[in-house]
Image (cartoon, rainbow, N blue to C red):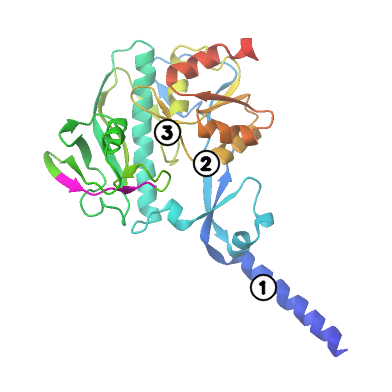
């Protein structure tokens, strides 16, 4: 009788422990798929034409705190979830509130750059002058900490002009990790010289970095009104989708009655940059019934194909290639 009582008590305690682990928060977060959503009704362009069937879809990733049970037991995590530590989402010294503000700023810039790229492709006279590399985040333990701040614009490296983020990476890349660089930094109306050390990139020990995240700074003036509202969604990864949708609205013949999902940060010259959360975004595109998913070429495309199933993945390096790929899609399908 005592043995049976002990077994029952043990089962009850085990159930309580599992229940507590299910609700107690952990130090990690889950990246989860979200269904792809149409841009119809979210992008308004002056002079737009009526939409036909199909359309352009954007894909986001849901981020939520993992429970203690989800952290220690992978089988209980939702389908397509990835577990990531908090520091992978928010650098030390920052906060989720600051990350949220940063993501919203990135979204605003992404919309403006996407509109400039799309309208220029359609032959509009767009003023879009690159002005340097805009700092959007600084790692608290990096050489740049305390010397460079978010909203600074880097305009030169060792006296050589920086007009784009690629310029900055290329010029810093001429150093060896550990060697300092002299940066010309615009803060407000002033430009100051700042000497910053370098360290090896965690992804490539031969590549020097100063520990900042940058985006394109540009003076953009659009010839027509373009309004985009995703109701609080942040980040730059919808840039390619925005640009495709603007062309679809003004010229048509982009989606061609298909559900076209797209992801990728877009640069002022039309280049498409890699993004995070590819696995979750592919699953989201599949769940929405997308016919095709455009993703940045390279590692993003390789990862996308691993989980794509029957969803057709089209890797692209730039905006014009994306348009050409869609123009020939039916012929090649």
| Secondary structure under the numbered disc 3 in the rendered image | loop
**Foreground: disc 3 or disc 1:** 1
Q: Are marks 1 and 2 in contact (CB under 8 Å)?
A: no
Residue denoted by label 2: 277
The residue shown at (45%, 32%) is 238
Task: Decide: few, some or many residues near mark 1? Use Cα within 10 Å; few <14, some 14-19, many ≥20.
Answer: few
The first of marks 3 and 1 along the sequence is 1
Quarter holding the N terminus? Answer: bottom right
The residue shown at (32%, 31%) is 166
Residue 123: assigned label: none
- Whole-angstrom CA distance, mark 3 to mark 2, is 22 Å
**Foreground: disc 3 or disc 2:** 2
Q: Is residue 23 above or below residue 147?
A: below
Residue 17: assigned label: 1
> Where residue 184 appears, x then y in whole percent?
16, 39
| Secondary structure under the numbered disc 1 in the rendered image | helix
> Where residue 325 appears, x then y in whole percent?
53, 16
| Secondary structure under the numbered disc 2 in the rendered image | loop
- Is residue 39 rendered to the left or right of residue 192? right
Q: In this orientation, does residue 254 appear?
A: no
Q: Is residue 330 magenta?
A: no
Q: Are marks 3 and 1 in contact (CB under 8 Å)?
A: no
Give the camera-side residue of 139 and 311.
139
Span shown in magenta? 194-201
The first of marks 3 and 2 along the sequence is 3
Asked where in the image residue 169 lies, by quadrant, the reply is top left
- Is residue 71 rendered to the left or right of residue 118? right
- Whole-angstrom CA distance, mark 1 to mark 2, is 32 Å
Residue denoted by label 3: 229
């Amino acid at each position: 009788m005592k043995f049976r009582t002990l077994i029952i008590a043990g089962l009850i305690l085990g159930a309580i422990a599992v229940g507590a682990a299910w609700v107690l928060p952990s130090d990690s977060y889950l990246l989860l798929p979200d269904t792809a959503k149409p841009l119809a009704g979210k992008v308004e362009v002056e002079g737009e034409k009526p939409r036909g069937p199909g359309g352009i879809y954007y894909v986001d990733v849901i981020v939520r705190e993992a429970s203690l049970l989800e952290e220690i037991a992978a089988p209980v995590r939702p389908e397509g979830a990835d577990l990531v530590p908090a520091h992978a989402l928010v650098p030390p010294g920052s906060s989720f509130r600051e990350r949220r503000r940063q993501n919203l700023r990135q979204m605003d810039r992404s919309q403006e750059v996407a509109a400039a790229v799309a309208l220029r492709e359609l032959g509009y006279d767009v003023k879009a002058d690159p002005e340097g590399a805009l700092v959007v985040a600084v790692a608290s333990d990096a050489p740049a900490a305390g010397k460079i701040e978010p909203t600074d614009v880097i305009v030169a490296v060792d006296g050589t002009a920086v007009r784009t983020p690629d310029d900055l990476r290329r010029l810093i890349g001429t150093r060896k990790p550990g060697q300092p660089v002299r940066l010309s930094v615009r803060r407000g109306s002033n430009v100051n010289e700042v000497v910053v050390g370098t360290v090896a990139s965690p992804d490539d020990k031969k590549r020097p970095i100063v520990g900042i995240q940058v985006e394109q700074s540009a003076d953009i003036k659009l010839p027509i009104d373009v309004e985009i509202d995703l109701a609080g969604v942040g980040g730059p990864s919808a840039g390619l989708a925005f640009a495709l949708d603007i062309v679809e609205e003004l010229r048509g013949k982009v989606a061609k009655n298909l559900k076209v999902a797209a992801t990728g940060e877009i640069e002022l010259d039309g280049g498409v940059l890699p993004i995070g959360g590819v696995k979750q975004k592919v699953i989201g595109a599949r769940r929405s019934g997308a016919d095709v998913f455009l993703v940045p070429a390279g590692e993003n495309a390789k990862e996308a194909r691993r989980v794509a199933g029957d969803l057709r993945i089209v890797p692209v390096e730039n905006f014009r290639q994306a348009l050409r790929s869609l123009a020939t899609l039916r012929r090649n399908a």
